[in-house]
Image (tube, coloured by chain):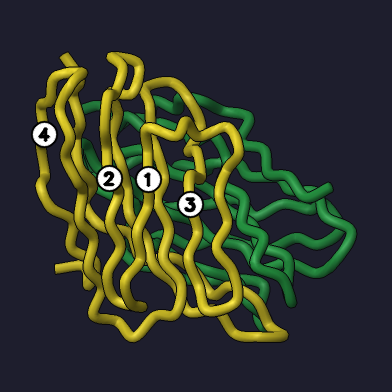
Chain colours: A yellow, B green
Amino acid sequence: ETGVTQTPRHLVMGMTNKKSLKCEQHLGHNAMYWYKQSAKKPLELMFVYSLEERVENNSVPSRFSPECPNSSHLFLHLHTLQPEDSALYLCASSHRDRGEGEYGYTFGSGTRLTVV
Amino acid sequence: AQSVTQLDSQVPVFEEAPVELRCNYSSSVSVYLFWYVQYPNQGLQLLLKYLSGSTLVKGINGFEAEFNKSQTSFHLRKPSVHISDTAEYFCAVSETGTYKYIFGTGTRLKVLA
């Protein structure tokens, strides 16, 4: 139990499907993130949610839509994905100290997404 | 601009041998430094971090790292590796007072029997 729970662990979806990834943290952290991890590529930050900011990587296609209803929950809504979107999607949370910065991330186990 | 470099994409080492995984960073301000480990089909797990104080930082699973400001490095070491240490290791840097957080490209450690 890492404190950050992601569901589902595995997801296979067709290009016309709509699905959502869920992330939940019980660490009292005040920031949450979505990362994409593809084979042989660096970790790609997709979205950041915190009290101070919502950051979107402009290179992330609009077929990925984040939702953060509160500081403990984060969703990634998926629709009309492409095969190249197949990857491990990681959720993370952290405590941001205003004036000091970031003290480290806690990651979930990830959702292995396969688009067919 | 802030950046982090892990020059070795793969490091093979025999069981019970020592290992060093290299990490160099560039930043114009003071930084926090981190090492994470990722086992297959898992998320990243924080191994250790340097925020301030002693430059030698001890982490979980017998790993340690040393912050060298003059060489802008934060190399990860273990005196004797085990088969179970086979994983990918990521270095990360964050500039103090900001929320900027950069991951390296990772080093795959393969421990051989």
Most foreground residue, B68 or A57: A57
Residue A59 in which image quadrant: top right
Q: Which mark is residue B73?
A: none
**Spatial separation of the CA atoms under disc 1 and disc 2:** 5 Å
Subunit ID for the residue under disc 1: A
CA neighbours of label 4 inside 10 A, class few (<14), some (14 to 19), many (20+): some
Looking at the picture, do discs 2 and 4 lie on one chain? Answer: yes
Looking at the picture, do discs 3 and 2 lie on one chain? Answer: yes
CA neighbours of label 1 inside 10 A, class few (<14), some (14 to 19), many (20+): some
Q: Which numbered disc, 1 or 4, marks the residue that appears first in the sequence?
A: 4
Q: Which numbered disc, 3 or 1, marks the residue that appears first in the sequence?
A: 3
Residue drawn 60% across the image and 76% down it: A52
Name the residue carrying label 4. A11
**Spatial separation of the CA atoms under disc 3 and disc 2:** 12 Å
- The image shows residue A18 at horizontal and vertical percentages of 17, 34
CA neighbours of label 2 inside 10 A, class few (<14), some (14 to 19), many (20+): some
Residue A32 in which image quadrant: bottom left
Q: Which mark is residue A47?
A: 3
Q: Secondary structure at mark 4?
A: strand
Q: Is residue A20 visible?
A: yes
Q: Secondary structure at mark 3?
A: strand
Name the residue carrying label 2. A77
Residue drawn 27% across the image and 45% down it: A77
Name the residue carrying label 1. A65
**Spatial separation of the CA atoms under disc 3 and disc 4:** 20 Å
Amino acid on which disc 4 is placed: Leu
